[in-house]
Amino acid sequence: METLDVVAIGQDLLITSMWLSGPAVAVSLVVGLGVSLMQTVTSIQEQTLSFAPRIVAVGAVMLLTLPWTLEQASAFTLRMMERMILVTQ
């Protein structure tokens, strides 16, 4: 296995992990920003208020994107197995 192969595998791993975590991170960011804006407008300074809406929103997004996530993870696994077969030949 050459250095370029290792770099390509690492790049594929990082890109796949960013795609898989992207929806949950984006929703957490948007919900957190919305709750922070509401806290600023209403002058409520409760630190733990933003956690419950984030948990619910991220859980809902993870359930909604589960089929796509499994498809992407399976495709990544198949790509890695194909690379493993090519390396062992």
Image: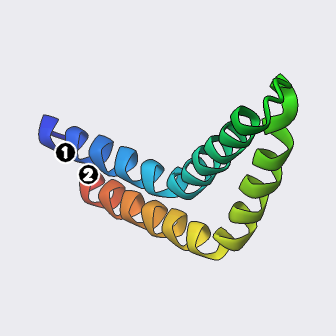
* Residue designated by label 1: 5
Which label's residue is closer to the chain start, 1 or 2?
1
**Residue 78 spot, x, y in % from top left:** 44, 67
Query: Which one is in front, 61 or 44?
Result: 44
* Residue designated by label 2: 87
Residue at 69 percent of width and 63 percent of height: 61
**Kind of residue sitting beneath label 1:** Asp
In the visual, does 40 lie left or right of 50?
left
Picture quadrant where residue 11 is located: top left
**Residue 77 spot, x, y in % from top left:** 48, 61
SS type, badge 2: helix
**Measured along the vertical axis of the image, is residue 65 above or below residue 54?**
below
Q: Nearer the viewer, mark 1 or mark 2?
A: 1
**Residue 59 spot, x, y in % from top left:** 78, 57
**Residue 55 spot, x, y in % from top left:** 80, 47
Q: Are marks 1 and 2 in contact (CB under 8 Å)?
A: yes
In the visual, does 76 lie left or right of 33?
left
Residue at 71 percent of width and 38 percent of height: 41
**Kind of residue sitting beneath label 2:** Val
Q: Quadrant of the C terminus?
A: bottom left
SS type, badge 1: helix
In the visual, does 15 lie left or right of 76?
left
How crowded is the residue under tag 2: few (<14 C-alpha within 10 Å), some, or many (20+)?
A: few
**Measured along the vertical axis of the image, is residue 80 above or below residue 2?**
below
Q: Quadrant of the N terminus?
A: top left
